[in-house]
Amino acid sequence: MGKAFPKGFYWGGATAANQLEGAWDVDGRGPSVDDHFLGGSVDTPREITIKIDPDRFYPNHDGIDFYHRYEEDITLFAEMGFNMYRMSIAWSRIFPKGDELEPNEAGLAFYDKVFDCCRAHGIEPLVTLSHYEMPYHLVEKYNGWESRELIELFERYAKTVLDRYHDKVRWWLTFNEINLGASAAGALFETSMIRGFEGPGSEVKVTPQQCYQALHHQFVASGRVVRYAHEHYPELKMGNMDCFILTYAATCDPADVWANQAEMDRMNWYCSDVQVRGAYPYYARRYWREHDVELDVRDGDLEDIAAGKVDFYTFSYYMSNTVTTHGDAEVTGGNMVSGGKNPYLESTDWGWQVDPTGLRIALNQIYARYQIPMMVVENGMGALDEVVVEDGEKRVHDQYRIAYLKKHVAAMAEAVDDGVDLIGYTWWGPIDLVSAGTGEMRKRYGFIYVDKHDDGTGDYSRLKKDSFYAYQKIIASNGVEGLD
Protein backbone atom coordinates (compact mmCIF):
# COMPACT_ATOMS: atom_id res chain seq x y z
CA MET A 1 0.00 0.00 0.00
CA GLY A 2 1.17 3.49 -0.83
CA LYS A 3 0.36 6.87 0.65
CA ALA A 4 -2.62 8.80 -0.67
CA PHE A 5 -1.83 11.94 -2.62
CA PRO A 6 -3.69 15.18 -1.87
CA LYS A 7 -7.34 15.36 -2.84
CA GLY A 8 -7.67 16.78 -6.35
CA PHE A 9 -4.15 15.71 -7.34
CA TYR A 10 -3.58 15.85 -11.10
CA TRP A 11 -2.55 12.57 -12.74
CA GLY A 12 -1.77 12.41 -16.43
CA GLY A 13 0.77 12.38 -19.20
CA ALA A 14 2.81 14.84 -21.25
CA THR A 15 3.58 15.21 -24.95
CA ALA A 16 4.86 17.84 -27.39
CA ALA A 17 3.14 18.84 -30.62
CA ASN A 18 6.19 18.34 -32.83
CA GLN A 19 6.76 14.79 -31.56
CA LEU A 20 3.28 13.37 -32.08
CA GLU A 21 0.96 15.55 -34.17
CA GLY A 22 2.39 14.88 -37.63
CA ALA A 23 0.42 16.63 -40.41
CA TRP A 24 3.40 18.95 -40.71
CA ASP A 25 2.15 20.70 -43.86
CA VAL A 26 -1.60 20.25 -43.43
CA ASP A 27 -4.25 22.98 -43.05
CA GLY A 28 -1.87 25.88 -43.48
CA ARG A 29 0.78 24.81 -40.98
CA GLY A 30 4.26 26.11 -41.78
CA PRO A 31 7.52 24.18 -41.35
CA SER A 32 8.83 24.16 -37.80
CA VAL A 33 12.49 23.88 -36.86
CA ASP A 34 11.91 20.21 -35.96
CA ASP A 35 10.68 19.48 -39.47
CA HIS A 36 14.27 19.99 -40.67
CA PHE A 37 15.68 17.27 -38.36
CA LEU A 38 16.43 13.80 -39.70
CA GLY A 39 16.32 10.72 -37.48
CA GLY A 40 19.33 9.54 -35.48
CA SER A 41 20.17 7.09 -32.70
CA VAL A 42 21.96 6.92 -29.39
CA ASP A 43 25.24 6.69 -31.34
CA THR A 44 24.39 8.84 -34.38
CA PRO A 45 23.27 12.44 -33.81
CA ARG A 46 20.27 13.84 -35.65
CA GLU A 47 21.18 15.85 -38.76
CA ILE A 48 19.72 19.18 -39.75
CA THR A 49 19.02 20.12 -43.35
CA ILE A 50 18.30 23.68 -44.45
CA LYS A 51 16.03 22.49 -47.24
CA ILE A 52 13.56 19.63 -46.88
CA ASP A 53 14.84 16.74 -49.01
CA PRO A 54 11.88 14.68 -50.30
CA ASP A 55 14.12 11.62 -50.58
CA ARG A 56 15.09 11.59 -46.89
CA PHE A 57 13.11 10.64 -43.77
CA TYR A 58 12.07 13.32 -41.30
CA PRO A 59 10.33 11.47 -38.44
CA ASN A 60 8.55 14.54 -37.04
CA HIS A 61 6.68 15.09 -40.31
CA ASP A 62 4.26 12.28 -39.48
CA GLY A 63 4.85 11.89 -35.74
CA ILE A 64 2.26 9.36 -34.63
CA ASP A 65 -0.54 11.11 -36.55
CA PHE A 66 -2.18 12.55 -33.43
CA TYR A 67 -3.57 15.28 -35.69
CA HIS A 68 -6.01 12.79 -37.14
CA ARG A 69 -6.23 10.41 -34.15
CA TYR A 70 -6.51 12.76 -31.17
CA GLU A 71 -10.00 11.54 -30.25
CA GLU A 72 -8.82 7.94 -30.04
CA ASP A 73 -5.76 8.90 -28.00
CA ILE A 74 -7.55 11.20 -25.57
CA THR A 75 -10.17 8.48 -25.05
CA LEU A 76 -7.36 6.08 -24.10
CA PHE A 77 -5.91 8.70 -21.72
CA ALA A 78 -9.31 9.02 -20.10
CA GLU A 79 -9.55 5.24 -19.77
CA MET A 80 -6.26 5.30 -17.86
CA GLY A 81 -7.85 7.84 -15.54
CA PHE A 82 -6.11 11.05 -16.57
CA ASN A 83 -7.53 14.28 -15.17
CA MET A 84 -4.72 16.32 -16.76
CA TYR A 85 -3.02 16.17 -20.15
CA ARG A 86 0.07 18.25 -20.72
CA MET A 87 0.45 19.13 -24.40
CA SER A 88 1.85 21.94 -26.50
CA ILE A 89 0.63 24.15 -29.30
CA ALA A 90 2.65 24.20 -32.52
CA TRP A 91 3.50 27.88 -33.08
CA SER A 92 3.74 27.28 -36.84
CA ARG A 93 0.19 25.91 -36.90
CA ILE A 94 -1.07 29.28 -35.61
CA PHE A 95 1.41 31.59 -37.38
CA PRO A 96 2.98 29.52 -40.19
CA LYS A 97 5.98 31.82 -40.66
CA GLY A 98 5.85 33.34 -37.19
CA ASP A 99 5.73 36.98 -38.26
CA GLU A 100 2.28 37.24 -39.84
CA LEU A 101 -0.17 39.78 -38.46
CA GLU A 102 -3.16 37.44 -38.58
CA PRO A 103 -3.32 33.83 -37.34
CA ASN A 104 -4.21 30.71 -39.30
CA GLU A 105 -7.83 29.93 -38.40
CA ALA A 106 -7.52 26.26 -39.35
CA GLY A 107 -4.76 25.83 -36.80
CA LEU A 108 -6.76 27.56 -34.08
CA ALA A 109 -9.78 25.41 -34.89
CA PHE A 110 -7.75 22.21 -34.48
CA TYR A 111 -6.81 23.04 -30.90
CA ASP A 112 -10.41 24.04 -30.16
CA LYS A 113 -11.36 20.48 -31.05
CA VAL A 114 -8.55 18.96 -28.96
CA PHE A 115 -9.41 21.03 -25.88
CA ASP A 116 -13.11 20.30 -26.28
CA CYS A 117 -12.31 16.59 -26.49
CA CYS A 118 -10.23 16.80 -23.31
CA ARG A 119 -13.03 18.63 -21.50
CA ALA A 120 -15.59 16.07 -22.66
CA HIS A 121 -13.48 13.40 -20.93
CA GLY A 122 -12.96 15.39 -17.73
CA ILE A 123 -9.31 16.12 -18.53
CA GLU A 124 -7.71 19.50 -17.76
CA PRO A 125 -5.29 20.59 -20.51
CA LEU A 126 -1.92 21.91 -19.31
CA VAL A 127 -0.58 23.76 -22.34
CA THR A 128 3.02 24.66 -23.17
CA LEU A 129 3.32 27.64 -25.50
CA SER A 130 6.80 26.80 -26.78
CA HIS A 131 7.99 23.20 -26.61
CA TYR A 132 11.18 22.80 -28.63
CA GLU A 133 9.93 24.38 -31.80
CA MET A 134 9.33 27.59 -33.67
CA PRO A 135 8.50 28.43 -37.30
CA TYR A 136 11.67 27.72 -39.30
CA HIS A 137 11.26 31.10 -41.00
CA LEU A 138 12.21 32.72 -37.68
CA VAL A 139 15.41 30.68 -37.65
CA GLU A 140 16.28 31.84 -41.16
CA LYS A 141 15.40 35.48 -40.55
CA TYR A 142 16.43 36.07 -36.94
CA ASN A 143 18.52 33.08 -35.78
CA GLY A 144 15.81 32.25 -33.31
CA TRP A 145 15.91 33.74 -29.84
CA GLU A 146 19.25 35.42 -30.38
CA SER A 147 17.26 38.31 -31.86
CA ARG A 148 15.16 40.62 -29.75
CA GLU A 149 12.49 40.70 -32.46
CA LEU A 150 11.30 37.30 -31.23
CA ILE A 151 9.88 38.89 -28.07
CA GLU A 152 7.14 40.76 -29.89
CA LEU A 153 6.41 37.87 -32.25
CA PHE A 154 6.06 35.43 -29.36
CA GLU A 155 3.83 37.90 -27.53
CA ARG A 156 1.53 38.11 -30.54
CA TYR A 157 1.30 34.34 -30.75
CA ALA A 158 0.81 33.87 -27.00
CA LYS A 159 -1.86 36.56 -26.70
CA THR A 160 -3.68 35.07 -29.68
CA VAL A 161 -3.99 31.65 -28.06
CA LEU A 162 -4.66 33.00 -24.56
CA ASP A 163 -7.50 35.12 -25.95
CA ARG A 164 -8.85 32.17 -27.90
CA TYR A 165 -8.64 29.42 -25.28
CA HIS A 166 -8.75 31.10 -21.86
CA ASP A 167 -12.15 29.57 -21.16
CA LYS A 168 -10.95 26.08 -22.14
CA VAL A 169 -7.40 26.00 -20.73
CA ARG A 170 -6.65 27.10 -17.18
CA TRP A 171 -3.06 25.89 -16.80
CA TRP A 172 -0.25 27.30 -19.00
CA LEU A 173 3.54 27.03 -19.28
CA THR A 174 5.62 29.47 -21.32
CA PHE A 175 8.86 27.69 -22.36
CA ASN A 176 9.68 24.00 -22.11
CA GLU A 177 12.94 23.17 -20.30
CA ILE A 178 14.02 26.79 -20.66
CA ASN A 179 17.26 26.21 -18.76
CA LEU A 180 18.62 24.05 -21.57
CA GLY A 181 18.94 27.29 -23.52
CA ALA A 182 22.23 27.76 -21.68
CA SER A 183 23.77 24.82 -23.58
CA ALA A 184 24.64 23.91 -27.17
CA ALA A 185 21.91 21.25 -27.15
CA GLY A 186 19.51 23.96 -26.07
CA ALA A 187 20.57 26.13 -28.99
CA LEU A 188 19.37 23.30 -31.21
CA PHE A 189 16.04 22.68 -29.51
CA GLU A 190 15.13 25.39 -27.03
CA THR A 191 16.38 28.67 -28.53
CA SER A 192 16.75 27.46 -32.16
CA MET A 193 19.95 29.38 -32.91
CA ILE A 194 20.86 27.36 -36.01
CA ARG A 195 20.52 29.84 -38.88
CA GLY A 196 22.50 28.59 -41.87
CA PHE A 197 23.57 25.42 -40.06
CA GLU A 198 23.49 22.06 -41.78
CA GLY A 199 24.90 18.80 -40.48
CA PRO A 200 24.92 16.75 -37.25
CA GLY A 201 23.19 18.54 -34.40
CA SER A 202 26.08 17.67 -32.10
CA GLU A 203 28.26 20.08 -34.08
CA VAL A 204 26.15 23.18 -33.38
CA LYS A 205 28.38 25.80 -31.75
CA VAL A 206 27.22 28.75 -29.70
CA THR A 207 28.88 31.14 -27.27
CA PRO A 208 27.78 31.87 -23.70
CA GLN A 209 27.00 35.39 -24.89
CA GLN A 210 24.52 34.05 -27.44
CA CYS A 211 22.95 31.61 -24.99
CA TYR A 212 22.40 34.05 -22.15
CA GLN A 213 21.22 36.85 -24.41
CA ALA A 214 18.69 34.46 -25.95
CA LEU A 215 17.54 33.44 -22.46
CA HIS A 216 17.17 37.12 -21.53
CA HIS A 217 14.86 37.60 -24.50
CA GLN A 218 12.82 34.58 -23.39
CA PHE A 219 12.62 35.87 -19.80
CA VAL A 220 11.26 39.19 -21.05
CA ALA A 221 8.80 37.46 -23.38
CA SER A 222 7.65 35.09 -20.64
CA GLY A 223 7.28 37.97 -18.19
CA ARG A 224 5.13 39.96 -20.60
CA VAL A 225 2.91 36.99 -21.39
CA VAL A 226 2.44 36.04 -17.73
CA ARG A 227 1.58 39.65 -16.87
CA TYR A 228 -0.89 39.81 -19.76
CA ALA A 229 -2.60 36.64 -18.56
CA HIS A 230 -2.78 37.84 -14.96
CA GLU A 231 -4.23 41.18 -15.99
CA HIS A 232 -6.77 39.90 -18.52
CA TYR A 233 -7.61 36.42 -17.23
CA PRO A 234 -6.89 36.27 -13.49
CA GLU A 235 -8.37 32.78 -13.26
CA LEU A 236 -5.47 31.38 -15.33
CA LYS A 237 -2.43 29.77 -13.72
CA MET A 238 0.92 30.49 -15.39
CA GLY A 239 3.98 28.34 -14.80
CA ASN A 240 7.60 27.84 -15.80
CA MET A 241 9.20 24.58 -16.87
CA ASP A 242 12.78 23.53 -16.13
CA CYS A 243 14.81 20.46 -16.98
CA PHE A 244 15.98 19.49 -13.49
CA ILE A 245 19.29 17.64 -13.76
CA LEU A 246 20.04 16.80 -10.15
CA THR A 247 23.77 16.44 -9.52
CA TYR A 248 25.76 15.14 -6.58
CA ALA A 249 29.36 15.81 -5.62
CA ALA A 250 31.23 12.67 -6.69
CA THR A 251 33.46 12.78 -3.59
CA CYS A 252 33.62 14.61 -0.28
CA ASP A 253 36.52 16.69 -1.59
CA PRO A 254 35.42 20.29 -0.87
CA ALA A 255 36.45 21.18 -4.41
CA ASP A 256 33.87 18.68 -5.70
CA VAL A 257 31.23 20.02 -3.33
CA TRP A 258 31.79 23.56 -4.58
CA ALA A 259 31.89 22.46 -8.22
CA ASN A 260 28.58 20.71 -7.71
CA GLN A 261 26.99 23.78 -6.13
CA ALA A 262 28.18 25.89 -9.06
CA GLU A 263 26.73 23.36 -11.50
CA MET A 264 23.39 23.33 -9.68
CA ASP A 265 23.28 27.13 -9.80
CA ARG A 266 24.12 27.22 -13.51
CA MET A 267 21.97 24.32 -14.62
CA ASN A 268 19.01 24.15 -12.27
CA TRP A 269 18.53 27.45 -10.45
CA TYR A 270 19.48 30.28 -12.81
CA CYS A 271 16.33 30.25 -14.97
CA SER A 272 13.83 29.40 -12.25
CA ASP A 273 15.28 32.05 -9.92
CA VAL A 274 14.44 34.58 -12.63
CA GLN A 275 10.98 33.24 -13.45
CA VAL A 276 9.84 32.46 -9.90
CA ARG A 277 11.48 35.36 -8.05
CA GLY A 278 11.29 37.91 -10.84
CA ALA A 279 14.95 38.99 -10.86
CA TYR A 280 18.40 37.74 -11.79
CA PRO A 281 20.09 35.85 -8.92
CA TYR A 282 23.08 37.21 -7.02
CA TYR A 283 25.52 34.68 -8.50
CA ALA A 284 24.69 35.60 -12.10
CA ARG A 285 27.03 38.61 -12.25
CA ARG A 286 30.16 36.67 -11.52
CA TYR A 287 29.17 33.95 -13.96
CA TRP A 288 28.55 36.51 -16.70
CA ARG A 289 31.87 38.20 -16.00
CA GLU A 290 33.89 34.97 -16.06
CA HIS A 291 32.24 33.84 -19.31
CA ASP A 292 32.42 37.14 -21.19
CA VAL A 293 28.67 37.68 -21.13
CA GLU A 294 27.43 41.27 -21.44
CA LEU A 295 23.67 41.29 -21.60
CA ASP A 296 21.89 43.86 -23.73
CA VAL A 297 19.18 44.88 -21.25
CA ARG A 298 16.75 47.49 -22.57
CA ASP A 299 14.58 49.91 -20.63
CA GLY A 300 11.62 48.06 -19.15
CA ASP A 301 13.13 44.58 -19.46
CA LEU A 302 13.73 44.05 -15.76
CA GLU A 303 10.30 45.44 -14.96
CA ASP A 304 8.73 42.99 -17.42
CA ILE A 305 10.60 40.13 -15.75
CA ALA A 306 9.58 41.28 -12.26
CA ALA A 307 5.93 41.61 -13.28
CA GLY A 308 5.86 38.12 -14.79
CA LYS A 309 6.53 35.89 -11.81
CA VAL A 310 4.96 32.47 -12.29
CA ASP A 311 2.22 30.98 -10.13
CA PHE A 312 3.57 27.44 -9.98
CA TYR A 313 6.83 25.61 -10.71
CA THR A 314 7.07 22.63 -13.06
CA PHE A 315 9.98 20.49 -14.11
CA SER A 316 11.14 17.37 -15.87
CA TYR A 317 13.03 14.72 -13.94
CA TYR A 318 14.54 11.65 -15.52
CA MET A 319 17.91 10.99 -13.94
CA SER A 320 20.80 12.38 -11.90
CA ASN A 321 24.52 12.82 -12.51
CA THR A 322 27.67 13.43 -10.50
CA VAL A 323 30.17 16.30 -10.61
CA THR A 324 33.87 16.08 -9.85
CA THR A 325 37.04 18.09 -10.25
CA HIS A 326 39.02 14.87 -10.61
CA GLY A 327 39.83 13.72 -14.11
CA ASP A 328 39.00 10.05 -13.72
CA ALA A 329 35.20 10.22 -13.76
CA GLU A 330 33.26 7.92 -16.09
CA VAL A 331 30.70 9.82 -18.17
CA THR A 332 27.14 8.68 -18.78
CA GLY A 333 24.29 9.90 -21.00
CA GLY A 334 21.16 11.81 -20.12
CA ASN A 335 18.41 14.22 -21.10
CA MET A 336 20.26 16.60 -23.49
CA VAL A 337 23.31 16.64 -21.21
CA SER A 338 25.86 14.11 -20.02
CA GLY A 339 27.47 13.84 -16.60
CA GLY A 340 29.43 11.73 -14.19
CA LYS A 341 28.37 8.12 -13.66
CA ASN A 342 27.11 7.12 -10.23
CA PRO A 343 28.17 3.58 -9.22
CA TYR A 344 25.14 3.23 -6.94
CA LEU A 345 22.58 3.57 -9.75
CA GLU A 346 21.32 1.41 -12.60
CA SER A 347 20.85 2.81 -16.11
CA THR A 348 18.29 2.54 -18.92
CA ASP A 349 18.98 1.15 -22.39
CA TRP A 350 20.03 4.67 -23.39
CA GLY A 351 22.42 5.15 -20.45
CA TRP A 352 20.19 7.38 -18.31
CA GLN A 353 20.76 6.68 -14.61
CA VAL A 354 17.63 5.69 -12.70
CA ASP A 355 17.40 7.56 -9.39
CA PRO A 356 13.91 7.73 -7.80
CA THR A 357 15.34 8.96 -4.48
CA GLY A 358 16.78 11.85 -6.47
CA LEU A 359 13.23 12.91 -7.33
CA ARG A 360 12.39 13.20 -3.63
CA ILE A 361 15.60 15.17 -3.09
CA ALA A 362 14.82 17.47 -6.04
CA LEU A 363 11.26 18.11 -4.87
CA ASN A 364 12.47 19.04 -1.40
CA GLN A 365 15.24 21.29 -2.68
CA ILE A 366 12.96 23.12 -5.11
CA TYR A 367 10.14 23.59 -2.60
CA ALA A 368 12.50 24.78 0.11
CA ARG A 369 13.77 27.43 -2.31
CA TYR A 370 10.47 28.70 -3.75
CA GLN A 371 7.51 27.65 -1.57
CA ILE A 372 5.00 27.64 -4.43
CA PRO A 373 2.88 24.76 -5.81
CA MET A 374 4.78 22.27 -7.95
CA MET A 375 4.18 19.72 -10.69
CA VAL A 376 6.41 16.99 -12.09
CA VAL A 377 5.44 17.39 -15.75
CA GLU A 378 7.93 14.98 -17.31
CA ASN A 379 9.22 11.73 -15.88
CA GLY A 380 9.71 8.44 -17.66
CA MET A 381 12.09 6.05 -19.35
CA GLY A 382 12.82 5.23 -22.95
CA ALA A 383 13.15 1.51 -23.54
CA LEU A 384 13.12 -1.19 -26.21
CA ASP A 385 9.69 -2.80 -26.20
CA GLU A 386 8.82 -6.17 -27.73
CA VAL A 387 5.37 -6.99 -29.04
CA VAL A 388 4.48 -10.63 -28.40
CA VAL A 389 1.44 -12.65 -29.44
CA GLU A 390 -0.30 -14.67 -26.73
CA ASP A 391 -3.61 -16.47 -27.27
CA GLY A 392 -3.95 -14.61 -30.54
CA GLU A 393 -3.59 -11.22 -28.85
CA LYS A 394 -0.71 -8.76 -29.17
CA ARG A 395 0.83 -7.72 -25.85
CA VAL A 396 3.76 -5.70 -24.49
CA HIS A 397 5.07 -6.86 -21.11
CA ASP A 398 7.01 -3.80 -19.92
CA GLN A 399 7.72 -4.64 -16.31
CA TYR A 400 10.83 -2.41 -16.38
CA ARG A 401 8.62 0.63 -17.10
CA ILE A 402 6.16 -0.37 -14.38
CA ALA A 403 9.02 -0.68 -11.88
CA TYR A 404 10.34 2.76 -12.85
CA LEU A 405 6.86 4.28 -12.52
CA LYS A 406 6.16 2.74 -9.12
CA LYS A 407 9.49 3.81 -7.63
CA HIS A 408 9.09 7.41 -8.77
CA VAL A 409 5.49 7.65 -7.60
CA ALA A 410 6.59 6.28 -4.22
CA ALA A 411 9.35 8.91 -4.07
CA MET A 412 6.80 11.65 -4.80
CA ALA A 413 4.56 10.32 -2.04
CA GLU A 414 7.45 10.63 0.40
CA ALA A 415 8.06 14.22 -0.75
CA VAL A 416 4.40 15.05 -0.18
CA ASP A 417 4.70 13.53 3.30
CA ASP A 418 7.79 15.70 3.78
CA GLY A 419 5.54 18.73 3.28
CA VAL A 420 6.15 19.53 -0.39
CA ASP A 421 3.14 21.16 -2.09
CA LEU A 422 3.05 18.81 -5.09
CA ILE A 423 -0.17 19.13 -7.08
CA GLY A 424 0.38 17.09 -10.25
CA TYR A 425 2.32 14.43 -12.16
CA THR A 426 2.34 13.91 -15.93
CA TRP A 427 4.40 10.99 -17.21
CA TRP A 428 6.46 11.80 -20.29
CA GLY A 429 5.13 10.09 -23.35
CA PRO A 430 2.02 8.25 -22.15
CA ILE A 431 1.87 7.15 -25.78
CA ASP A 432 4.93 6.29 -27.89
CA LEU A 433 6.17 9.27 -29.89
CA VAL A 434 9.23 10.53 -31.75
CA SER A 435 12.21 11.04 -29.42
CA ALA A 436 13.37 14.66 -29.37
CA GLY A 437 17.02 13.84 -28.82
CA THR A 438 17.48 10.95 -31.23
CA GLY A 439 14.43 11.08 -33.50
CA GLU A 440 13.78 7.40 -32.82
CA MET A 441 10.54 5.53 -32.37
CA ARG A 442 12.24 2.45 -30.90
CA LYS A 443 13.07 4.53 -27.82
CA ARG A 444 9.61 4.05 -26.42
CA TYR A 445 8.19 5.80 -23.36
CA GLY A 446 4.50 5.08 -23.66
CA PHE A 447 1.91 3.11 -21.79
CA ILE A 448 0.37 2.84 -25.26
CA TYR A 449 2.36 1.20 -28.07
CA VAL A 450 2.20 2.83 -31.51
CA ASP A 451 2.96 0.72 -34.58
CA LYS A 452 5.41 3.10 -36.21
CA HIS A 453 9.09 2.35 -36.74
CA ASP A 454 12.35 4.14 -37.45
CA ASP A 455 12.16 3.47 -41.18
CA GLY A 456 8.75 5.12 -41.34
CA THR A 457 6.80 1.88 -41.68
CA GLY A 458 3.84 0.88 -39.54
CA ASP A 459 0.08 1.24 -39.51
CA TYR A 460 -0.06 3.63 -36.50
CA SER A 461 -2.39 1.30 -34.60
CA ARG A 462 -2.47 1.69 -30.81
CA LEU A 463 -1.94 -1.13 -28.27
CA LYS A 464 -2.22 -0.96 -24.48
CA LYS A 465 0.93 -2.19 -22.73
CA ASP A 466 0.94 -3.81 -19.30
CA SER A 467 2.02 -0.44 -17.89
CA PHE A 468 -1.29 1.06 -19.08
CA TYR A 469 -3.12 -0.99 -16.48
CA ALA A 470 -0.46 -0.41 -13.81
CA TYR A 471 -0.80 3.37 -14.11
CA GLN A 472 -4.60 3.04 -14.27
CA LYS A 473 -4.57 1.30 -10.88
CA ILE A 474 -2.31 3.92 -9.30
CA ILE A 475 -4.52 6.75 -10.56
CA ALA A 476 -7.79 5.09 -9.53
CA SER A 477 -6.55 4.83 -5.94
CA ASN A 478 -4.85 8.27 -5.91
CA GLY A 479 -1.53 6.55 -5.27
CA VAL A 480 -2.65 4.25 -2.48
CA GLU A 481 -2.64 1.03 -4.50
CA GLY A 482 -0.48 -0.42 -7.24
CA LEU A 483 2.96 0.43 -5.79
CA ASP A 484 3.79 -2.95 -4.25
Image: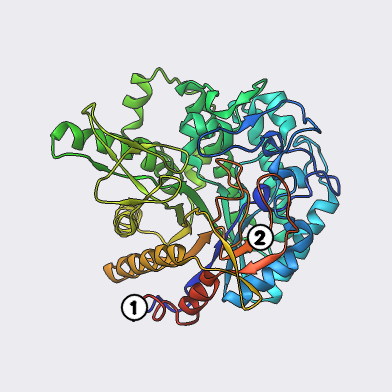
Q: In the picture, which quadrant includes the C terminus?
A: bottom left
Tell me where residue 477 appears, x and y as whole percent: 45, 82
Front residue of this view, candidates 329 and 226 = 329
Residue 10 in view (yes/no): yes
Residue at the spot 79% in from the left edge and 54% down from the top edge: 108
Q: Say if 304 sits above or below 388 in the image.
A: above
What separation in Å lies between label 2 and label 1 (alpha carbons)? Answer: 32 Å
Kind of residue at disc 1: Lys
Q: Is residue 122 left or right of residue 476?
A: right
Q: Residue at x 65, y 68 (%)?
A: 463
Q: Which residue is mark 2?
A: 450
Circle 2 SS class: strand
Hey, which quadrant is residue 85 in on the image? bottom right
Q: Are marks 2 and 1 in contact (CB under 8 Å)?
A: no
**Mark 1 burial class by Cα count in 10 Å: few <14, some 14-19, many 20+:** some
The disc, 2 or 1, on the residue closer to the chain's N-terminal end is: 1
Residue at point 77%, 31% (across, down)? 52
Q: Secondary structure at mark 1?
A: loop
Q: Is residue 394 above or below residue 281?
A: below
Residue 474 lies left or right of residue 453; in this view the side is left
Residue at mark 1: 3
